[in-house]
Amino acid sequence: MKVIITTHEAIINIKQLLELDDQVPLLYYLLVGNYNRLYQYDKAIPEGEKALDIYKKWDSKPESVLGQYYVRICIIGKINGVDHRWSDQLTATNRS
């Protein structure tokens, strides 16, 4: 049996999981990806920031793949006029 859900349904499901545990950075990155698919950068960027806040609280850094993905979202958002607060720090982190 194959289950296919829409991007909107995925967002709803991820938000339900976050209600159970809002300290799972991967869930926020999944939201970023789904909002990106809908070209909703203004919603994607804050979700990525929440994930990065968790890493900061843990005194840790995101895995480079996730960090790079967020940087791409920030760049696309910047092109579209959406401001974000973590892009400079992430760009420096991903260069090292």
Image (cartoon, rainbow, N blue to C red):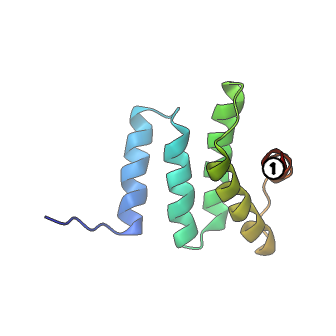
Name the residue furthest left: 1
Name the residue furthest front: 96
Q: Position of residue 91 (x, y in %)?
A: 82, 52
Left or right of 96, for residue 61: left
Left or right of 37, for residue 20: left
**Amino acid type at mark 1:** Arg
Residue 6 position (above or below residue 13): below
- Please name the residue shown 38% across and 45% down the image: 16
Left or right of 39, for residue 9: left
As rendered, which of 15 and 95 lies closer to the eye? 95
Q: Local crowd at mark 1 within 10 Å, few (<14), some, or many (≥20)? A: few
- Please name the residue shown 86% across and 48% down the image: 92
Q: Position of residue 35 (x, y in %)?
A: 54, 64
Left or right of 76, for residue 38: left
Q: Position of residue 61 (x, y in %)?
A: 70, 35
Q: Position of residue 27 (x, y in %)?
A: 49, 45
Name the residue furthest top: 58
Q: How many marks?
A: 1
Q: Secondary structure at mark 1?
A: loop
Residue annotated with mark 1: 85
Would you identify the image quadrant in which residue 58 lies?
A: top right
Position of the N terminus by quadrant:
bottom left
- Please name the residue shown 73% across and 58% down the image: 71
Would you identify the image quadrant in which residue 83 lies?
A: bottom right
- Please name the residue shown 83% across and 51% down the image: 95
As rendered, which of 47 and 96 lies closer to the eye? 96
Position of the C terminus by quadrant:
top right
